[in-house]
Amino acid sequence: MKFILAAIPLVLLAACQSPTAGLLENPDLCKAGARQSLVGTPISSLDQSALPKLSRVIHPKSAVTMDYRQDRLNVYVGEDGKIEKVTCG
């Protein structure tokens, strides 16, 4: 009986673990860090065929899903037609 009572706090602590803990193991799985040189360049000069299969180019006021995929590359385009940021997600 004492063993069961001692195990309860451990079970409760395990239940509190963040579901995103495993996602932080490789935060640059989509290789966004290697593509930071795109920031500031016009979107018209982007060769989209050179991007990974799981990529999306997000223009201003575009509707996008909010699901997080650490292997997906996101290229954000600003109002001025230039790439603002490149991230995973």
Image (cartoon, rainbow, N blue to C red):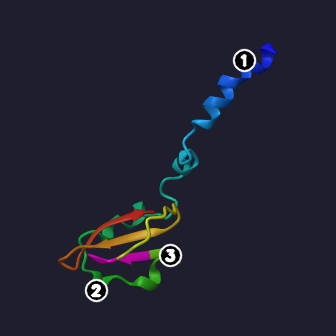
Question: In this view, which residue lies farthest toward the right?
Answer: 1
Q: Looking at the image, is 62 positioned above or below residue 73?
A: below
- Disc 2 marks a residue whose amino acid type is Ser
Magenta range is 56-62
**For the N terminus, which image quadrant?**
top right
Q: Identify the residue position indicated by label 3 in the image.
A: 52
Q: Check if residue 10 falls in the magenta segment.
A: no
Which of disc 3 and disc 1 is earlier in sequence? 1
Residue 26: x and y in percent read 53, 52
Using the image, tell me which numbered label, if any, was put on residue 44.
2
Residue found at x 25% / y 75%: 41
- Disc 1 marks a residue whose amino acid type is Ala
Q: Identify the residue position indicated by label 1 in the image.
A: 6
- Disc 3 marks a residue whose amino acid type is Pro
Q: What element carries label 3?
A: loop
Left or right: where does residue 33 sit relative to residue 30?
left
Residue 14: x and y in percent read 64, 34
